[in-house]
Amino acid sequence: MGQSCLRPLRLNSRPFSTASTEFSILCSQGYIKEAFNKFTFLIWNNPSHFSCLLQACIQKNTFSLTKQLHSLIITSGCIRDKFVSNHLLNAYSKLGQLDIALTLFDKLPKRNVMSFNILIGGYVQIGDLDSAYKMFDEMGERNLASWNAIITGFTQFEFNERALSLFTRMYGLGYLPDAFTLGAVLRGCAGLKDLNKGREVHGCVLKLGLDGHLVVASSLAHMYMRSGSLREGEIVIMSMPAQTVAAWNTLIAGRAQNGCFEGALELYNLMKIVGFRPDKITFVSVISSCSELATIGQGQQIHSEVVKTGAICVVAVVSSLISMYSKCGCLDEAEKIFEEREEADIVLWSAMISAYGFHGRGKNAVELFHRMEQEGLAPNHVTLLSLLYACSHSGMKDEGLEFFNLMVEKYNVEPQLVHYTCVVDLLGRAGRLQEAEDLIRSMHVKPDGVIWKTLLSACKIHKNADMARSIAEEVLRIDPQDSASYVLLANVQASAKRWKYVSEVRKSMKDRGVKKEPGISWLELKNQVHHFIMGDKSHPQSEEVDVYLKELIAELKLEGYVPDTGSVLHDMELEEQEYNLVHHSEKLAIAFALMNTPAGFPIRIMKNLRICGDCHMAVKYISKKKNREIIVRDSSRFHHFKDGCCSCGDYW
DNA sequence: TAGGCCCGTT
């Protein structure tokens, strides 16, 4: 410390060390003013007390006191002390006053590597990675913390490639990474789903003996799971020296992200049994698993646990609850939770807009979007995606296209592939197939299988068999194993009665070993999940269901229902075609539900594939004949059947 | 002295 920055003023007779301890306690508890007023003499005696106060200012977020301390530091001459000046720099930077920090930095009599590191952190905090890197690049001397600051900065904002290349550079220069570096680098690998690089870093972790570090091990497991290697991830967690809630969260999230939703819920129950309390992150993972499985009973149970633990105050948890209720078919409950919200958060609004979209309630989605704008919230790319989706699934072509045009113009959000996919859907439904194709070919992003498949579906709706052939080529070039595209293509050709081409499609499926994904429907009844698959007799009531369904179909035929065999491949005998149609999994599930629930009770069915034209027609008849509300969630949206009509307006 | 790194939302 500088010689002349001390002005010894001993005004208190208490022993110095006792006063110093009391001072530290006051600071750490946030009683900054009290500490300052009572122990001013300490500050004058030892400038390190300024550091203590400044730390407290950061915690308490008090800018005014920081400024007061700043003038004192100047008048006392302590600005020459590099500890104190760095703490001051850090306080400004943390309090979001980077401009003041930079001015101070320029005037500092003594700077060191820490001063630079603090400013790099400050730039990262405001998301200005370019300036952060410039500062990093221009600093003369660097230490490990400098590399960590810039690497974690890049991974925080998903610039994962840059983070990894910096890591390679740093390693090459002989810096040994620590737990901070490795945590960030593994996060980068996870973001890129780069299993090879991740394994390389794992080697590095072992070499440095950091495999026992809880955060490093957790990150390592997360990296494996995000990259699709559930097993390796679970092995890492199992061999961790101690279990933490974060480790359980990693396991649960890993399963959920790999489509193993039942497994995620099993682990959730297990973690509670072994005595860990789920936290907000656990809840988000398990609630989204319930959304996918549409197991409303479990979802409600978790909802009540969320309320009990107080996690209901967390915006992310509430958003996932909204999404869960809507994906379970309970739009009313989703609305209720949304209206009870305590915070204005874009994610909450997006969740609700998306919920309306799933249920084909485009008008509500648009209304909500305008309400959101009135409240002064700016939409992000997800909000706009939900809105476009809602428009396309409600037949609101003009509104949808209008919003797409406003994306860049008004909302300043660059469209991504998913937005284009919605627009292709909008144009496709409107029969503007050529425009849709032109859009795909002129986008600045590379098309994927999904966007081509969207156009292929539109070709099916508008029975354009020629275009379907050329578009199918595009889909199958990208994903030659996608059974749904073959089926779609075969069906378009079948509806144009091009039987020769239908057989060709079937043959190429066979040659390439592509099998049609079996349709599965399921529903929850008294907290138990019942699955139905065509031809599968494993359900205890399957024989009774078959008999009931046969009678039901006969009844429907009297009402005017004619099975539509257009959705089945043609070379089957008519009777066999009818058998297959009658036994589609959703019909089985609905028959089961009719048999096992009281009259008037709404029926909720989930299906892994899209509902076919024949089932859609049959369910309309069932809803009228049996006077039941039937809600079917297929792989793309909700269908609410009531009194012989469907909410999708026969457009899906 | 700083960074508090991993797991979650629409």
Image (cartoon, grey):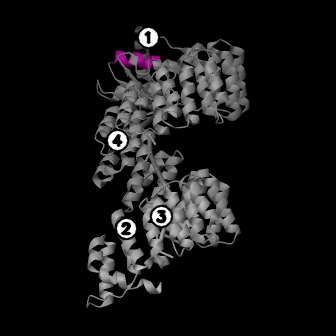
Could you tell me which chain the residue with mark 1 belongs to?
A
Whether residue A620 appears in magenta in the rendering, the answer is yes
Q: Does residue A496 appear anywhere in the picture?
A: yes
Q: Which mark is residue A393?
A: none
Q: Do callouts 1 and 2 point to residues on the same chain?
A: yes
Corner quadrant of residue A131: bottom right
Query: What residue type is disc 3 on?
Result: Ala
SS state under label 3:
helix
Q: Do callouts 1 and 3 point to residues on the same chain?
A: yes
Q: Earlier in the sequence, mark 4 or mark 2?
A: 2
What span is colored magenta in the figure? A617-626
How far, Cα to Cα, is label 4 from label 3?
A: 53 Å
Q: Earlier in the sequence, mark 1 or mark 3?
A: 3
Corner quadrant of residue A146: bottom right
Residue assigned mark 4: A297
Left/right placement of residue A649 relative to residue A580 reads left
